[in-house]
Structures are given as C-alpha cells and as structure tokens.
Image: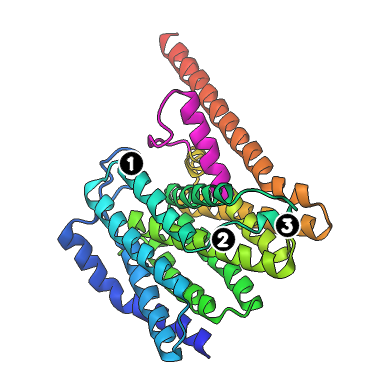
C-alpha cells in the first residue's frame, strides 16, 4: 500500500507544482536560451524540471518515511547531497559555474558517500581478490563522479535523460523489492512518479520544460549512489555476482560508454574532456535528421535491447560477453553513425558540384 502511495503522491505533487514551477523559472531567469552554443531547440524553455522532480520526490519520500517511522541513516547523507546537487545545478543553470569548481564539489560529495561506508568492497568477494581499502574507496569515488557526469552529459535531447533515469530507477526498484528494502522502494517509486509527469511535459510542444543541471546532477547522483548501495547489498548477500548486480551494470553501460568515447575524442584533439561540443551519441543521431522523439526512441530502444541481451548472456554463464556486449556494440554504432555522416557530406558536396556544373553549362 505504501508503495502505491509513494508513487501516486509524487505524481500528484508534481502535477500540482508544475504551473508554479514554470512561473518561478521565468521569474528567476531559469530559462534555456536557444541562442547559446550547442543548443538543439528553437524556443526559450524553462530549466525547472530538475527542481520540480527533485522537490516532488523528496516530499513524497519523506512523508511516507515519517508516517512509517522508518529512516536508514544512509539516506541522511544521500538526501543532503541530493539537495546540494539540486541547488548547485540550479545555480549552474542560471549563472554557469566553471567546470573545475563543479568537479571539485563532485569529488567532495563522492568522498562523503564513501566515508559513510558505501563503497565497492564486494569486488574482493565476487572476484576473489585482496584489493586494499584505499583502492576500493578511490575507485568508488571515480565511479560516482563519472556516473554523475555521464547522466549530466546525455541530457541533450527531449526525453533521453528522463527515459534513462526512469528505466534505471525501475530496475533498482526490482532489486530493492527483491532485497526487501522498503525505504528504497518508496524512494524509487517517488522518483518514477515525478519522472512520468516530467517526461510528458518534456516531450510536449506547449508548456515544455527541460531537466537542467539541477536535475541531471541530483538525479544522476541519486541513481549512481543507490546503484552502488544495492550492487553491494546483492553481492554480499549472494557472495557472488548475480542477476541483480549484473542488471545494475548493464543499464549503466550506455551512458558510461558514451561519455568515455566523447572524452577520448576530445583528449585526442588536444582539448579539455569537459569542453562542450556536439559529439555525443544523441548528436550523431540528430545529424541524420532524426527528430528528438525518434532519436530518443532509437537510443533507448538500443539500450533496452542490449540490456536484455546482456542479462541473457549472463544467465547462460557467458559473464565476460555480458559485460562487454554493450560497450562493444555502442562503439560500433558510434563508428557507423560517423561513417553515415561522412557519406552524407560527400553526397552533398557531389550534388553541389553537379548543380554548379549545370549552371555554368
């Protein structure tokens, strides 16, 4: 019953706060200007989605937790950092915080999580290793920071980030329900309820809103940290890699792979990996004249296809293939898109030459 309440309450709160949030965005200047570099939309759009989703899920989650008088100390740190990321993201949406400053704050937040005792110590268990604690903690900090940035960077077209977050929270809900972690269930259902409303408004043409950094940073952080928490809990319970933890890795693969490809290309060009450009997977799909909806459908559909195939390979005992399938296929898909883009450019050059030749003739 509480699961239904947390979902429904979050959904209703998001619907109620929506018109207020749009007015607030216009009043304080939280508007995405299409005149800025790298923008792929044409109209000024409120950057209020993150604050709307974050506020709604927090109200729903906290109310249910208070009524049930259940509160894991782990959530004190997670919610505190979640709110910090919402505020940081909103300030960045409004004033553009330098990348280095954001990066340092992200490292500090990841350190707080690790210091609370949540880090990838199960790697020693599932791989029968004896890695030192300092290495496991440092690696966890790296994963958290990379994950937050990965989800921040895929927020480039309508519905893409919202769809990936919804799918991620749905899988975590399955895992937390399997592990009988009720408070996690309430948190994920609250997030999903808010995201359902956001996606509807993100895809529409009238009264559209964007997630903004306030949402991509805070919700990306929430997804990554909860993924690590449940990854650890499931592995420690089973004392080995299992279908729950494999699923967590599988749905994280595409955002991580996309970010790794883009960062590698930027470094090879001699520029900062954090220098914004239009080289992400969704940009490459848009270059082929896909609409936002079709591009999102294609990428999400590909991610789901690879997810279920990875899970099938894992169940067949092909563990290495299960882990490498998504990165390998995404790299191939990326290369294919670049080749198609180059082919279209050559065709356009040939057509322009033919037209000029006819005019001269």
Residue 180 vertical placement versus 141 (above, below) = below
Q: Quadrant of residue 238?
A: bottom right
* Magenta-drawn segment: 254-279
Residue in the image at 33% along x and 71% along y: 55
Residue 228 is marked as: 2
Q: Is residue 356 magenta?
A: no
Q: Nearer the viewer, mark 3 or mark 1?
A: 3
Residue extending farthest to the right is: 316
- How many C-alpha atoms fall within 10 Å of the one at disc 3: few (<14), some, or many (≥20)? some
Residue 342 at what x, y percent from top left? 55, 26
Q: Is residue 48 left or right of residue 108?
A: left
Say which of marks 1 and 2 sits in front: 2
Count of number-bearing discs = 3
Q: Which residue is mark 3?
A: 126
In the rendered structure, are the residues bearing label 1 and label 2 in contact, judged by CB atoms less than 8 Å apart? no
Q: Is residue 145 above or below residue 336?
A: below
Which residue carries the number 1 mark? 99
Mark 3 or 2, nearer chain start: 3
| Residue located at (63% from left, 42% from top) | 330
**Figure check: 339 above or below 327:** above
Foreground mark, 3 or 2? 3
**Residue 272 counted in the magenta span:** yes
Q: Residues within 10 Å of mark 1 (few under 14, many from 20)?
A: few
**Looking at the image, which residue is at 17% across and 60% down?**
28
Q: Which mark is first along the chain, 2 or 1? A: 1
Are the residues flagged by discs 3 and 2 in contact, CB closer than 8 Å?
no
Distance Cα–Cα, label 1 vs label 2 = 25 Å
Q: Looking at the picture, how far across and down is residue 215, in whole percent?
A: 37, 60
């Amino acid at each position: 019953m509480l699961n239904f309440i947390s979902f429904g309450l979050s959904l209703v709160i998001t619907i109620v706060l929506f018109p207020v949030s749009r007015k607030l965005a216009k009043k304080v200047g939280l508007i995405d200007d299409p005149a800025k570099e790298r923008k792929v939309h044409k109209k000024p759009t409120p950057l209020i989605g993150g604050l709307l989703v974050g506020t709604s899920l927090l109200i729903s989650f906290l109310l249910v937790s208070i009524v049930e008088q259940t509160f894991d100390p782990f959530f004190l740190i997670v919610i505190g950092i979640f709110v910090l990321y919402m505020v940081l993201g909103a300030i960045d949406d409004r004033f553009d915080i330098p990348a280095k400053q954001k990066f340092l704050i992200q490292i500090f937040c990841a350190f707080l999580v690790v210091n609370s005792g949540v880090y990838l110590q199960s790697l020693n268990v599932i791989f029968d290793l004896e890695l030192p604690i300092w290495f496991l903690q440092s690696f966890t900090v790296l994963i958290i920071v990379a994950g937050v940035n990965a989800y921040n960077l895929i927020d480039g077209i309508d519905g893409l980030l919202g769809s990936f977050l919804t799918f991620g929270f749905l899988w975590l809900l399955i895992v937390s329900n399997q592990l009988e972690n009720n408070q996690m269930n309430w948190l994920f259902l609250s997030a999903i309820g808010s995201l359902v409303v956001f996606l509807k408004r993100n895809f529409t043409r009238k009264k559209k809103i964007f997630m903004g950094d306030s949402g991509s940073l805070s919700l990306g952080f929430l997804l990554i940290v909860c993924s690590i928490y449940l990854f650890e809990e499931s592995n420690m319970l089973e004392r080995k890699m299992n279908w729950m933890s494999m699923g967590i890795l599988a749905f994280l693969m595409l955002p991580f792979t996309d970010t790794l490809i883009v960062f590698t290309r930027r470094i090879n060009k001699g520029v900062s990996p954090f220098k914004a450009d239009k080289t992400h997977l969704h940009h490459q799909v848009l270059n082929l004249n896909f609409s936002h909806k079709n591009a999102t459908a294609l990428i999400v559909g590909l991610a789901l296809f690879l997810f279920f195939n990875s899970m099938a390979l894992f169940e067949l005992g092909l563990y290495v293939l299960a882990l490498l399938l998504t990165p390998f296929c995404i790299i191939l898909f990326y290369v294919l898109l670049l080749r198609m883009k180059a082919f279209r450019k050559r065709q356009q050059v040939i057509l322009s030459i033919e037209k000029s030749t006819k005019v001269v003739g």
